[in-house]
Image (cartoon, coloured by chain):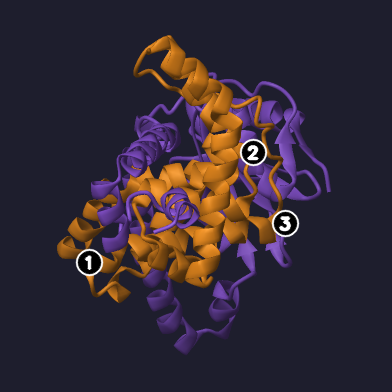
Amino acid sequence: MMMKQRRFEALVDAFQADLYRYAYWLCHDKTVAEDIVQETYLRAWKALDSLQDEHAAKSWLITILRRENARRFERKQFDLVDIDDFAVASEDGSPDTAIEQREIQRHISALALEYREPLILQLIFGLSGDEIATQLQLNKNTVMTRLFRARNQLKDALQPYSQQGGQQHG
Amino acid sequence: MDDLTFRRALMSSPDELDEALRKAIAEQPDKKQLWLEHQRLNEKLRNAVCVPAPDGMRARLMLRQTMQQRHRSRRRQYWAVAASVALVSLFSLTYLLPGNVNLGDHALAHVYHEGTAPFLIDEQVGLSQVNAKLAQFSGQFTGDIGKVYYANLCDFDRIKSLHMIIDGPDGKVSVFVVPHQAQQQVPAYFHDALYTGESKNLGHASVVVVGKSAAAVEQALQRVSNQLQFSA
């Protein structure tokens, strides 16, 4: 039992922050995101004996989290917070950086889920195109196209910003 | 490698560079420049998605797991008892079957086996956080219910319920919002040597309050029930 407890704590320490971020970008609500992470780890605890290979832990937890998120929609759709209303703390860097970061967050939130989710998996967990394809049960070409479109939309949306920034920084 | 293919590859996955991409970056300054721009964009995106995890989330994760573990071992004890009793009394077995639940007994059992842990923490839970959890039962608090130290969804004898610790006039009290299911028995008053409890049927769910004094329990029950509404 102690061994199981230690494995569980290691999984919490290694992945809780990234799982929270992933959940947050799926639901746009801090409280709901933490609830999803709570449910994910409860399921993980119950099924911990089935996790044989620690290298598979990350994708195992992502799979559980995706199921928990889907379950939320089976039960009841939460009211989603309007993207202009949410504020994500960003205490690092200059005020300019913070404003730009908020702008980027707003545009990421506005991406369709089918573009947002593979991008988030890539940025937060560093998953490769193949790994994202396995996780989302899509073929790799579809994933690469969606990643391309996601970045393309963000690049277009942020164009005025980067030009401004470019001038400021010479 | 043509320009379009190069751009597409960078836009899809700037960190996954194959041999042809590496070669193009190394040999062609304009492609290296493009690659650097994409690296910068990617860095900005990565910083933007790295929202901070809430304070205390690790402690809450560990607390829930500990409670779950205690609950399960407790449940195993219940079934062990049930199995023995079943040999001598069919009545007892009927009592322990799922669904035929006396909420008063379970509220007391729940308070005992969670022990002091929920009473020691103060998560300063806001009304909107409580309402986000209550939304699962189509319920919401329409006004202030006083200080909430702890609020979480818990397994209340296989019924997913809201468990809160709130302030009472002379100490903390436990509050459960339990959605109604068939064959539920909800006694209006119940008690044992240490705790006293009271419940109120609100149609879609019952509010059950457990505390050490009858006056505190009644006051908390009124306060919570008056603000609780169900939409469906």
| Residue A137 seen anywhere in this rendered image of the structure | yes
Q: Are marks 1 and 3 in contact (CB under 8 Å)?
A: no
Residue, disc 1:
A54
Q: Residues within 10 Å of mark 3 (few under 14, many from 20)?
A: some
Residue A82 pos. (x, y %): 69, 32
Residue displayed at 18% across by 57% down: A6
Under mark 2, the amino acid is: Ala
Q: Are marks 2 and 1 on the same chain?
A: yes
- Quarter of the figure with the N terminus of chain B: bottom left
Under mark 3, the amino acid is: His
Which element type, helix, strand or loop, lies under badge 2?
A: helix
Give the label, 2 or 3, closer to the camera: 2
Under mark 1, the amino acid is: Glu
| Residue B213 seen anywhere in this rendered image of the structure | no
Q: Earlier in the sequence, mark 2 or mark 1?
A: 1
| Outermost residue to the left | A3
Give the label, 1 or 3, closer to the camera: 1
Instruction: Indicate left or right for A64 with B20 as reference.
Output: right
Q: Which chain is orange?
A: A
Residue nearer the viewer, B153 or A32: A32
Residue B81 pos. (x, y %): 40, 75
| Outermost residue to the right | B232
Residue displayed at 31% across by 68% down: A48
Residue, disc 3:
B180
Based on the displayed image, in which of its 4 quarters is residue A135 positioned? Answer: bottom left
Q: Residues within 10 Å of mark 1 (few under 14, many from 20)?
A: few
Q: How many marks?
A: 3
Q: Chain of mark 2?
A: A
Residue, disc 2:
A110
